Image (cartoon, rainbow, N blue to C red):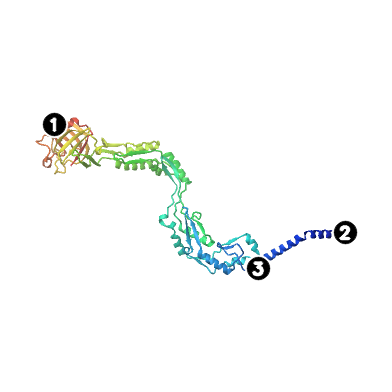
Amino acid sequence: MSTKAKNKVQKENNFKAWFNTHKKWCLTGGIVILVLLIGYFGGSVYYSGKYLPGTSINGIDVGGLNLTKAKEKVSQGVKDHQIVLKFNDGKNESINSSQLGLGYNENNTINKVLDKQSSFGWVGALMNSKDYAVKDVITVDEQALTSGLQSLEHMKAENQVAPTDAYVQYKDGKFSIAKETEGSTIQFDQLLNSVKTALANGKTTINVRKENCYVQPAVKEDNQDLKNKLSAANEYCKSVISYKTSSGKEFTLDGSVMLDWLTKKDDGTYVRDDSVFKENVLAFVKKMAVSYNTVNQSTTFKGSDGAMHTVTGGTYGIRVMPATETAEVMELIKQNKSDVNRTPRTTGKSSSDENGGLGNTYVEVNITKQHMWFYKNGSCILQSDFVSGLESDPKRTTPNGAYYIYFKQRNRVLRGEKNPDGTWPYEAPVKYWMAFNGGIGFHDLHRSAYGGEIYKTNGSHGCINLSESVAASLYASLDDNTPVIVYR
């Protein structure tokens, strides 16, 4: 036997020996393969005309169902469908099929999913589930959907909080950028479109914020314009200037006010335009002056009769000088200096905040009683009857008001206003003259009597007539700028 023949016989013997040794396993393996093939083809037969396992349409599992059964299940799914809306306050709201205005479209195309599948792919489908978005499964009544969404609690007007833009703020004496807030105002059209998209894709949950349905602030904290303004504010608006009136009313000029006075340049930066600042400071000072001024204001004081009296008008009091005060405030601002509880530049006279501004040294003149009291340091050191201006003549009556002694003179001749022909209407030499209202003042004038109702028929030309002794005593004790309050 040739060598080649011997080798062939040897190989055959080796195979027979191996087979005899592994015959059991070979038979078992063959049976397993046969069973798998039978199972595979059996599954293929089973899924013929049916959706493969793991198949979902718009989130509804139709695996193993034929087209008819699948349509029934999808139809029921449409009826049971709801969408959960997640809002930025952490609360959720659900909207059901009826509120969504959903209907089932009998002429949908879910059959195309089945047509694309091969029953021989059922094994792979077991390990790879797939959801198909079929957009023509549902119909949407947009009017019903709109009404449904508008009925949500989060859509009610009282629950709609508008967003706020970031801005430069002045707080506790410092400037900073206040962060914007999102609020809870919903862009309805955006929400409507998001719901429509979710319905078309079979989604059941919508995150309202992630869908960009909230109205957003127009200015965010990283805005360059805000950064520019913050930088300018820290450079130009450091001053704090405040005032407090006698009534306790306060006016403060600080960064919170000056911030809006900054001027924006073409390059986007902000500067202090002195002309703009001056105009605004002047307006601020004038507004403050309305409350600070006491001239021509009402004066309420406690009279000698124990009652409270209110008098309007007169020259006593102070008046802020807007131009002068504005100039001084501007210098403070330019130097970034402050002046808290500042006393403004004023004209006029005022001795105190007590007793309506009269203080405790003043002359009280009661026209009705034709009597005067002179208080000095809180004590009445002189009182007397007098005769005032002729009450029946508007040109001669003594007017009410708060005044002050602005001029004193001994041995003066009082003449009144000169007549057109150059003569004087009267000439009255007096020894003691104390003026408080133009040509009206206290002076001595000999009369047979004082007080009573003389002023109604034989009154003066407006002055307060006193006996010489009283006038002398008053003159000796009365200082310039002493308040004089005249009332009825």
Q: Is residue 169 above or below residue 82?
A: above
Label ID, residue 45: 3
Asked whether the beta carbons under mark 2 and mark 1 sit within 8 Å of each other, the answer is no
Q: Is residue 392 above or below residue 448?
A: below
* Residue 242 placement: quadrant: top left
Q: Residue at x 66, y 67 (%)?
A: 42
- In the image, is 71 to the left or to the right of 256? right
Q: In the rendered structure, which amino acid carries the disc numbered 1?
A: Ser
- Image position, residue 241 (x, y; %): 36, 38
Crowding at dot 3, Cα within 10 Å, few <14 / some 14-19 / many 20+, comes out as few
- Image position, residue 163 (x, y; %): 44, 51
Query: Could you say which is closer to the camera, residue 275 or residue 114?
Result: 114
Q: Residue furthest right?
A: 1
Asked whether the beta carbons under mark 3 and mark 2 sit within 8 Å of each other, the answer is no
Give me the C-alpha separation between circle 1 and circle 3: 139 Å
Give me the C-alpha separation between circle 2 and circle 1: 172 Å
- For mark 1, what is the residue? 469
Give me the C-alpha separation between circle 3 and circle 2: 51 Å
**Quick one: label 1 or label 3, which is nearer the N terminus?**
3
Q: Nearer the viewer, mark 2 or mark 1?
A: 2
- Image position, residue 446 (x, y; %): 11, 34
- In the image, is 144 to the left or to the right of 314? right
Q: In the rendered structure, which amino acid carries the disc numbered 3?
A: Val
Q: Could you tell me which secondary element the residue under label 3 belongs to?
A: helix
Tell me the quadrant of the picture where the C terminus can be found.
top left
* Residue 303 placement: quadrant: top left
Query: Could you say which is closer to the camera, residue 430 or residue 442?
Result: 442
- Image position, residue 64 (x, y; %): 60, 65
- For mark 2, what is the residue? 6
Q: In the rendered structure, which amino acid carries the disc numbered 2?
A: Lys
Query: Could you say which is closer to the camera, residue 155 or residue 398?
Result: 155
